[in-house]
Amino acid sequence: MTESRFRTRVVVNGQTIERDVPVRQHLVDFLREDLGLTGSHLGCEHGVCGACQVMVDGKVVRGCLTLAVQADGKRVDTIEGLSDSGELAALQQAFLAHNAFQCGFCSSGMLLTALDIVRHHPDAGRDEIRDLISGNYCRCTGYHAIVDAIESVLRAHGSVLADADAQGAAR
């Protein structure tokens, strides 16, 4: 018995991709195996750890719970694309400055969550930041350094990044 496939057209990091994908293939597997975008990691494969996160049409989603066919006709941004575009530069610098990267396994998902916080919660305090990152596991940092990094970007750049996001959404 052959596996059912679906012709999918998706814009990944600004590039239109058209492929036949297995109907049961997860988005993170498609990105990693078919496109070689290995920045998003497979952790728990149950949607609990956040290591597999990507953005679909500007929303953070769990790549291990999203099927590739569900991205048909949508825009997918990965850590690679957001890093190359410079959208994560302030957060990446803050994570470095606050030693929030440690082993790096959670970093891609944590950075996407942090970007979402900066875009949609520019006035978040430490407790709200902790709540908003609670869906991302980090086994190395104890989260203090991550909260420090996100808070520093919010205080220094939050409104600038939120304005840039609004301009990008208007395009």
Image: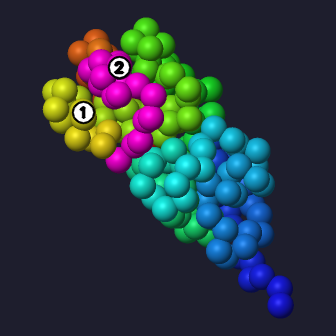
> Percent x, y for residue 83?
57, 27
**Real-space CA distance between mark 2 and mark 1, rounded to the nearest whole angstrom:** 12 Å
Q: Amino acid at mark 1?
A: Ile
The residue shown at (49%, 62%) is 46
Judge left or right: residue 101 versus residue 128: right
The image quadrant of residue 30 is: bottom right
Among numbered discs 2 and 1, the one appearing first in the sequence: 1
Report helix, strand or loop for mark 1: helix
> Percent x, y for residue 142?
35, 28
Say which mark, if any, is on residue 119.
none
The residue shown at (64%, 48%) is 12
Say which mark, if any, is on residue 145.
2
Find out whether residue 43 is within the magenta segment: no
Asked if one can make out residue 12 in the rendered structure from this viewpoint, the answer is yes
- Crowding at dot 2, Cα within 10 Å, few <14 / some 14-19 / many 20+, comes out as some
- Residue pushed farthest right? 1
Look at the picture and state if 149 lies above or below 25: above
Judge left or right: residue 4 versus residue 108: right
Look at the picture and state if 138 lies above or below 91: below
Say which mark, if any, is on residue 129.
1
The residue shown at (51%, 22%) is 102
Report helix, strand or loop for mark 2: helix
> Percent x, y for residue 70?
55, 68
> Percent x, y for residue 90?
43, 17
- Crowding at dot 1, Cα within 10 Å, few <14 / some 14-19 / many 20+, comes out as many
- The N terminus lies in quadrant: bottom right
The residue shown at (60%, 44%) is 41
Magenta extent:
135-151
